[in-house]
Amino acid sequence: MKKITLIFIPFILFITSSCDPERYCNEPACLYSDVNVIIEAKLSGNIDSIINIGDTIWLQVKIPDTMQTNYGEIVFSYLWQNSFFGLISGGGDSLHGEGTGVYINTVEMLPISILPLNEKYGARKWDYPTRNFRCFFVPVNKGKYVIELNGGRIEMTDNKGKDWLINPSFTLNQPFRLNQYLNWMSEGMRPEAEQRLKENKSWYCFEVK
């Protein structure tokens, strides 16, 4: 029986280069940056805690024209095509194990995109001219589901001509329903799962009946 880890799968960045880049700075040539931004993602459609097969949930993620970062305001001029973020979606019948657990009888729930849904190593890319990503989910099986946004890389040029490497993180505009999720698992799993998830604002769960 196939099992998958539910959420918090490490988001591995695959980066290739003809020479070893500098490991830590704030420009696109670097492997790592200390520039961070939080981007709000918006869910709409049927966003009840329990929905029906065939209902639609929309997801929109837009990089704002002006980003509020730990380096201050950064105003966009151009988004580079190496930019991407992580999107995980799926579910199953029930949860078992320890911590956040794994699903039994995994059910896929693939995003259907109305913009070009480019993928690189399992990552999602924005529509580069608009810096927008929009897709929708239509579950076709009963089950308990999670949608999660995580990590990635924004490579860009600002309005002053400076190039940046920025680490995006995400919040969703809907409650993440921690109690609903905890009720899907045995009591022994709940304390660790609650500790891991209670501060995370980038995931959303719901049930399909």
Image (tube, helix red, strand yellow):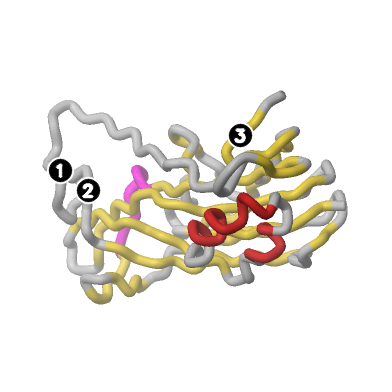
Residue 23's disc is 1
Q: Can residue 6 be seen in this view?
A: no
Q: Which residue lies furthest to the top in this view?
A: 1
Q: Nearer the viewer, mark 2 or mark 3?
A: 3
Q: Where is residue 2 in the image (x, y as percent from the top left)?
A: 68, 26
Answer whether residue 21 is magenta in the image.
no
Q: Nearer the viewer, mark 1 or mark 3?
A: 3
Q: Residues within 10 Å of mark 3 (few under 14, many from 20)?
A: some
Q: Is mark 2 on a helix, strand or loop?
A: loop
The residue carrying mark 3 is: 4
Magenta segment includes 80:
yes
Q: What residue type is labelled 1?
A: Arg
Q: Compare marks 1 and 3 and give the one earlier in the sequence.
A: 3
Pick the residue in front: 71 or 75: 71
Q: How far apart are marks 1 and 3 (CA)?
A: 32 Å
Residue 32: assigned label: 2
Residue 39: x and y in percent read 44, 66
| Nearer to me, 95 or 44 | 95
Is 72 displayed left or right of 23 in the figure? right
Left or right placement of residue 177 versus residue 171 in this view: right
Assign a secondary structure to mark 1.
loop
Number of residues whose C-alpha sits closer than 10 Å to that of mark 2, classed few (under 14), some (14–19) or many (20 or more): some
Three-letter amino acid code of the residue under disc 3: Ile
Q: Residue 14 carries which label?
A: none
Q: Distance between the residues labelled 2 and 3?
A: 29 Å
Q: Earlier in the sequence, mark 2 or mark 1?
A: 1
Magenta region: which residues?
Answer: 77-83
Task: State yes or no: discs 2 and 1 in contact (Cβ < 8 Å).
Answer: yes
Q: Is residue 170 above or below residue 114?
A: below
In the rendered image, the quadrant that contains the N terminus is top right
